[in-house]
């Protein structure tokens, strides 16, 4: 993202990274064994997709700083859950350690970005109505 202000959650680099990661994990889980379809595959897909969804919800709640922070916290929790499922996939030998390390590094970056957003919540939260600058 450039130095301009975000007009929408889709402008946020953290959202773009989360969406890209979720897409990559979706594609990667296509090769997981069929018996994992309703357990590991679904869990990994759900948690990785939920990161971006929670960021989008946070954006919609930025009129209310407490809710904004709550949704960003949920997004961070989802990235941590995704880390867990990646570790399980490695343990089950569905992901190799090198690929997992790449995904975990991206999740760590997303986590740091979310932490920064939480620390600077006032810069994202509006003091007036949701369409004040529209």
Image (cartoon, rainbow, N blue to C red):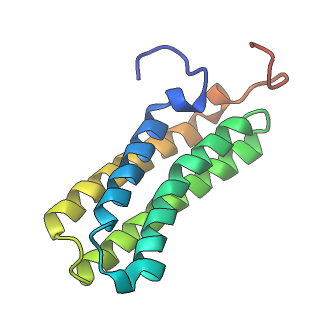
Name which quarter of the figure residue 83 lies in: bottom left
In the rendered image of this protein, does residue 56 appear above or below residue 43?
Answer: above
Give the image location of residue 123, x and y in percent: 63, 26
Give the image location of residue 15, x and y in percent: 49, 39
| Residue beneath the point at 50% across and 63% down | 47
In the rendered view, does 134 fall on the left or right side of 111?
A: right
In the rendered image of this protein, does residue 21 appear above or below residue 3?
Answer: below
Task: Report the front residue among 120 and 110.
Answer: 110
Name which quarter of the figure residue 60 lies in: top right
- Residue 67 seen in the current view: yes
| Residue beneath the point at 33% across and 79% down | 88
Give the image location of residue 10, x and y in percent: 53, 31
Give the image location of residue 28, x and y in percent: 29, 61
Quadrant placement of the N terminus: top left
Total of numbered circles in the picture?
Answer: 0
Task: Report the front residue among 46 and 100.
Answer: 46
- Residue 108 seen in the current view: no
In the rendered image of this protein, does residue 24 appear above or below residue 14?
Answer: below
| Residue beneath the point at 38% across and 82% down | 36
Quadrant placement of the C terminus: top right
Q: Residue furthest bottom?
A: 35
| Residue beneath the point at 50% across and 44% down | 114
In the rendered view, does 107 fall on the left or right side of 4?
A: left
């Amino acid at each position: 993202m450039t130095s301009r202000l975000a007009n929408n959650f889709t402008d946020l680099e953290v959202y773009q990274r989360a969406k890209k990661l979720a897409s990559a994990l979706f594609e990667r889980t296509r090769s997981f064994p069929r018996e994992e379809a309703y357990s590991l595959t679904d869990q990994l897909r759900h948690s990785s997709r939920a990161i971006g969804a929670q960021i989008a919800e946070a954006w919609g709640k930025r009129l209310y700083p407490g809710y904004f922070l709550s949704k960003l916290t949920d997004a961070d929790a989802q990235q941590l859950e995704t880390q867990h499922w990646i570790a399980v996939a490695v343990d089950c030998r569905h992901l190799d350690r090198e690929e997992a390390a790449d995904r975990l590094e991206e999740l760590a970056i997303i986590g740091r970005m979310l932490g920064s957003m939480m620390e600077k919540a006032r810069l994202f939260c509006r003091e007036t109505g949701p369409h004040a600058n529209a």
